[in-house]
Amino acid sequence: MKEYDVVIVGAGAAGMTAAIYALRAKKSVALLERLTPGGQVLKTTRIENYPGLASVTGPEFAGKLREQVLKFGGEFIAAEVSEIKPTEKGFEVLTDDDPVLGLAVILANGSRERELGLPREKELTGRGVSYCATCDGALYKGKTVAVYGGGNTAAYSVMYLAGVASKVYWIFRKPSPRAEKHLVEKVAEITNVEVLSGTVITELLGEDRLAGLKFASGKELAVDGLFILIGREADNERFRGLVELDENGYIKSSETCETSRPGVFVAGDTRAKKLHQIVTATADGAVAANAAIEYLNNK
């Protein structure tokens, strides 16, 4: 079993920032990521609220972080973590491939897309239903699509899809979106976008593929694609028993990103906190790495 000073679960903004700080402290680091390094930021069309960067795409931002990690000698391992077991020496991290041993562990596994919970939603995912506009938007060139959700991610997705699809419906259940005002104003200027406020989707129509939506009002709308962007939720059941979770499944921690388990630290969206943003994820990564470094040095 290969051994590292620090094993980081997740290679998003939080995980890669933690890796950079730990590597600069001359610790050996492995980042375990089941998808492409970058995490949720890869699905972001445009980042405009990160200090010092007026505007950058998500993939560009993630790419720069990855370059820094590799520059300092970090190792990326493509694997999905299933369980973490404390041992006398540290922590055995079990994956769908070979296990690894970490003297300290940083949980930076992010969160997962929240689903609507409608019948046949899973069945139609990839067949008209998507949770990422930048991932799947190109499939709907010249077609009619809908974005469901009222936050910033939904607003950015509407703007992106408006340049691809012939018609975009922006649908949200509240009277007005919660997205930042300047984004709402930008969307209002786009001619092929129609806003449907105070609208709730109750049924997905179509057989083999999505063909339309049915609303609580009883009305139906024909669409070729639906992008569900209603936030994210915790994905930490595999760590229950290892660390303490809050009532929503997020990992509890101190201000120094220490969990209830000595030697296990947490950073990013998987951590219980109020603000889930890229800037807070990178901040968590730096704090968690520093705490892990102190733990290892003292140990």
Image (spheres, helix red, strand yellow):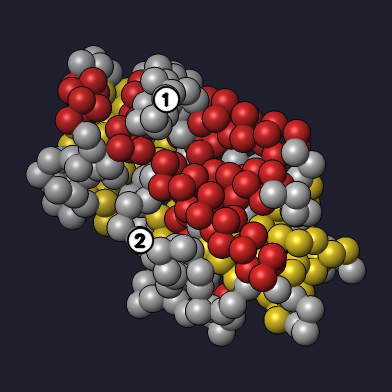
Q: Quadrant of the N terminus?
A: bottom right
Q: Label 1: how many residues lie within 10 Å, few (<14), some (14-19) or many (20+)?
A: few
Q: Where residue 52 is drawn, which disc sits there?
A: 1
Query: Disc 1 marks which amino acid?
Result: Gly
Specify which label sits upstream in the sequence, 2 or 1. Answer: 1
Q: Where residue 273 is drawn, which disc sits there?
A: 2
Identify which residue is drawn at 49% across, 45% down.
Answer: 282
Q: Position of residue 223 (x, y in %)?
A: 36, 35
Element at label 2: loop
Q: Quadrant of residue 95?
A: bottom right
Element at label 1: loop
Identify which residue is drawn at 26% across, 34% down.
Answer: 170
Residue 225 visible, this orientation: yes
Query: Disc 2 marks which amino acid?
Result: Lys
Q: Is residue 90 toward the left or the right of residue 174 in the image? A: right
Q: Nearer the viewer, residue 238 or 259?
A: 259
